Every structure is written in C-alpha cells, then in structure tokens.
Amino acid sequence: MTDRQYAAWKYAEDLIEETPELEHARRASLEMGIEPISPATGAALAQLVAAARASTIIEIGTGLGVSALWLLRGAPAAQLTSIDTEPEHQATARDLILRAGTPAARVRLIAGRAAEVLPRINDASYDLVLVDADVSSVNAYLVEALRIVRPGGTVAIPRILQGARVADPTARDETTQDLRDLLRSAVGSQDVVSAVLPVGDGLLLLTKR
C-alpha cells in the first residue's frame, strides 16, 4: 500500500463516528485482547443490512458486541442471533446492546460452539450471516453459513485479507493459503455474487443467488 492509499484508507476509517456504546465495546475489547471489526467495516455492514432491510441476522462470534451494535444500528428492527463460546463476553455485549435501545426480545445470544449450533439451524433462515470468527475456522463455517442464508441474502466475512498477508506471495502459512483458496473459489462460484471491500482487514461479501 502506498502512502496515499494508506492515507485514504485511514481517512475512511477515521471518518466514522461511533455511539457511546460502540466506543465502550471497542475500548473494552481492545483491553481484553479481542480484535473488534474496524469502524469502517462496521459502517459497511450497517449500510448493507439497511439497504437489504434485513429482518433476521446471525453472527458467529459475539465478542463484546461491536459487530452486533453496528448491525443493529443499520437494522434496528431486526432479530439478531449471536453465537460465542464465552458467556461472560456475551453478558457484556447484551448489556451494551440493551443500553443502545434494542428491546431484549430482539436479541438471542447462544453460548456454544458454532460448529455444534449451526447444523441445527433451518435452511434459508437469515437475511445476513456474519462470520466474525477466528480466520482458521472460516472455511469450516462458510458451508453452513451459505446454507442458512436465504436466496438474495448475504454472508459477510471480515478480516479476509489479514492485513497484507493474503496479498503477500511470501506468506505461505496454512491459514493464509486457505484464505486465498476461499477467495479464488468465491470469485469463481456461480452460486454467489461476491465482492471484497478494502475496509478494515478486508470484508468479503457473498450474496446467494
């Protein structure tokens, strides 16, 4: 990335203003060593669910609620389901989500492993599926994500470029290679319409035909 490209990327990130609840969730996440999605990534997701008028959203990876707060900012009337293995983190996320004005009945937090929860979800149940999990697990979750998203719905995967690693031909670790394979497969698939947005560490969007 050239200096001018970096300046443009940073400007887009710094331009975004977050609510007090988002600022709290982001600060607490960083203090606990949890990497939240970037402000521009959150804004892109909010715009996506707003444009789609999403009514059902599921995310894999609650964290402390940064992504959930952004999604509900774009679709405040949506039903949000979020899966995470850390119930303590989810308790913090729920408190911030409710503080932001979302009714408790619209938020369902499931404490458990996504690999065990996702197979129990019905086909074509969600307008948007956010896979905000460890990048080493992305491939494993993608098949289920595409199954449970409705036709016309979107699967979103942040951090898909891993900074500059995916674009760096000298980076040959297994996770980076897997992400390259996933991107090549997504671009060549006739089952989805795909795009990679250069926000945060990269945001892959897969809209199911």
Image: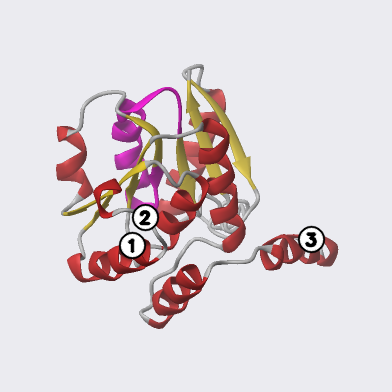
Residue 135 within the segment the image draws in magenta: yes
Q: What type is the residue that disc 3 sits on?
A: Ala
Above or below 62: residue 184: above
Question: Residues at badges 1 and 2 in contact (C-beta under 8 Å)?
Answer: yes
Q: Is 44 displayed left or right of 141 in the figure?
A: right
Which residue bears the numbered disc 2?
A: 102
Q: Secondary structure at mark 1?
A: helix
Q: Residue at x 79, y 66 (%)?
A: 7
Q: Residue at x 33, y 62 (%)?
A: 98
Of the two numbered discs 3 and 2 in the rendering, the one whose residue sits closer to the viewer: 2
Measured Cα–Cα span from mark 3 to mark 1: 34 Å
| Sequence-wise first label, 3 or 1 | 3
Q: Secondary structure at mark 3?
A: helix
Q: Is 35 displayed left or right of 16 in the figure?
A: left
Question: Residues at badges 3 and 1 in contact (C-beta under 8 Å)?
Answer: no
Which residue bears the numbered disc 3?
A: 8
Measured Cα–Cα span from mark 1 to mark 2: 5 Å
Q: Quadrant of the N terminus?
A: bottom right
> How many labels sit on residues?
3
